[in-house]
Image (cartoon, rainbow, N blue to C red):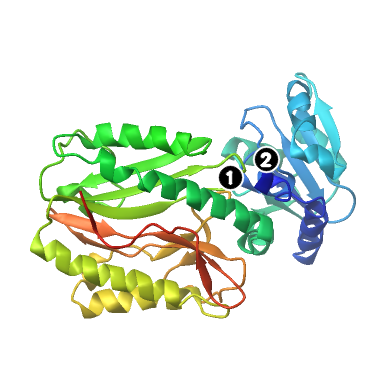
């Protein structure tokens, strides 16, 4: 664990989740390995066919059911600081029946949003009288409002991915393939302190018009704009995500024209961030500038997504989401313009809503970098 992660999983969090569970009228939360379990306990459990499950009843003490062979890992995780009872089960036991006996007769259970269907169906059989709902209905408000420690972890992630973008101009060379550049970027992401590489997008020339382009063997050519969208997970569990657009040599004139529009749109969206502003208003701040310049139909995705223990989580910065921003909300601001068959561009920063406005967690220049 890094120094910023010592306060990421406070001992009070289980009690906060229990209170939220009761307030939602849910009998118990059942959290299997994934971001929900890690958020509550700090335990980054392996997702296995053997059941690991944190049970948080609306009434009574929380406990964690773990396969006996995984008990040492659970006991050495941050979850050991929470005063949880670890209930180990053996290979011939039925852990779903064990949970059902301990939970008792409840009308509703909240299942981890990333729970495997196999586990959900086993719980349905073990608790036939309980309606199943998503645990996210309870956890979303808690997970959206990042604590100071979580913001510090995201700030650390932002600095790490910025350090990678600083190296990108030296990697983009005429005659190299996207795949070759992507391999070097992946190595740099790990060297910058990430524990995993979550994605590397290197979209050169016409491939830049595909927002989620996969690395290919296309050879980068003179005059190619190149969209580089990269991110990973830090040892703290918190994620990075940042996009910059580069050009290998002087770009086409039409690209330069809309890149300046995009830069202004991204700046306007970041400037719109402050408490009480609806998420959709941040989207509109970017979209209106792009549409007024005649590129509205070329901005084909939402302006942003929340980020934390997952690269994509709530809140989503998109039309129709009237959720007001609040201090601690962290999300991307990443408008883009895409001309199919020709080129594309995107600029992305992670922004956290503060008491008075917004703080960018990425600080690389936004002007087009010509290499």
256 in relation to 28, above or below? below
Task: Report helix, strand or loop for mark 1.
Answer: loop
Q: Quadrant of residue 175?
A: top left
Which residue appears at 16% of the width and 37% of the height? 218
- Residue to which mark 1 is pinned: 114
Q: Quadrant of the N terminus?
A: top right
Residues 207 and 265: in front is 265
Rendered position, 122 above or below 294: above
User: Residue 126: percent from the left, percent from the top?
Assistant: 75, 39
258 on left or right of 352: left
Residue 12, quarter of the rendered image = bottom right
What's the CA distance linking mark 1 and mark 2?
Answer: 8 Å
Helix, strand or loop for disc 2: loop
| Direction from residue 268 to residue 29 in the image, left or right | right
Closest to the observer, 182 or 117: 182
Q: Which residue lies under the disc numbered 2?
A: 32
Q: CB of mark 1 within 8 Å of CB of mark 2?
A: yes
């Amino acid at each position: 664990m890094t120094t910023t992660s010592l306060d990421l999983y406070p001992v009070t969090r289980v009690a906060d989740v229990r209170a939220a569970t009761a307030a939602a009228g849910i009998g118990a939360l059942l959290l299997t390995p994934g971001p929900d379990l890690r958020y509550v306990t700090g335990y980054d459990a392996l997702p296995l066919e053997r059941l690991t499950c944190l049970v948080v009843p609306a009434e009574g003490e929380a406990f964690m059911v773990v396969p006996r062979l995984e008990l040492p890992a659970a006991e050495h995780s941050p979850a050991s600081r929470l005063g949880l009872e670890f209930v180990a089960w053996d290979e011939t036991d039925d852990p779903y029946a064990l949970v059902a006996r301990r939970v008792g007769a409840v009308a509703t259970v909240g299942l981890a949003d990333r729970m495997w269907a196999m586990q959900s169906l086993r719980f349905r059989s073990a608790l036939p009288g309980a309606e199943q709902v998503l645990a996210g209905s309870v956890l979303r408000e808690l997970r959206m409002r990042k604590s100071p420690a979580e913001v510090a972890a995201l700030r650390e992630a932002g600095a790490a991915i910025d350090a990678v973008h600083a190296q990108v101009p030296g990697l983009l060379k005429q005659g190299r393939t996207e795949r070759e550049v992507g391999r070097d970027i992946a190595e740099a992401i790990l060297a910058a302190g990430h524990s995993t590489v979550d994605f590397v997008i290197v979209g050169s020339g016409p491939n830049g018009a595909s927002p989620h382009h996969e690395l290919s063997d296309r050879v980068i050519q003179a005059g190619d704009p190149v969209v580089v969208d990269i991110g990973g997970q830090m040892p703290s569990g918190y994620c990075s995500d940042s996009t910059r657009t580069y050009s290998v040599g002087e770009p086409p004139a039409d690209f330069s024209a809309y890149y300046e529009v995009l830069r202004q749109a991204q700046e306007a969206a970041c400037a719109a961030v402050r408490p009480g502003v609806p998420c959709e208003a941040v989207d509109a701040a970017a979209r209106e500038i792009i549409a007024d310049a005649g590129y509205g139909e070329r901005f084909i995705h939402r302006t942003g997504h929340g980020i934390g223990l997952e690269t994509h989580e709530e809140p989503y910065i998109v039309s129709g989401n009237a959720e007001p921003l609040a201090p601690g909300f962290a999300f991307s601001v990443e408008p883009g313009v895409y001309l199919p068959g020709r080129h594309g561009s995107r600029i992305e920063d992670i922004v956290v809503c503060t008491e008075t406005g917004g703080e960018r967690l990425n600080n690389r220049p936004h002007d087009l970098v010509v290499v």
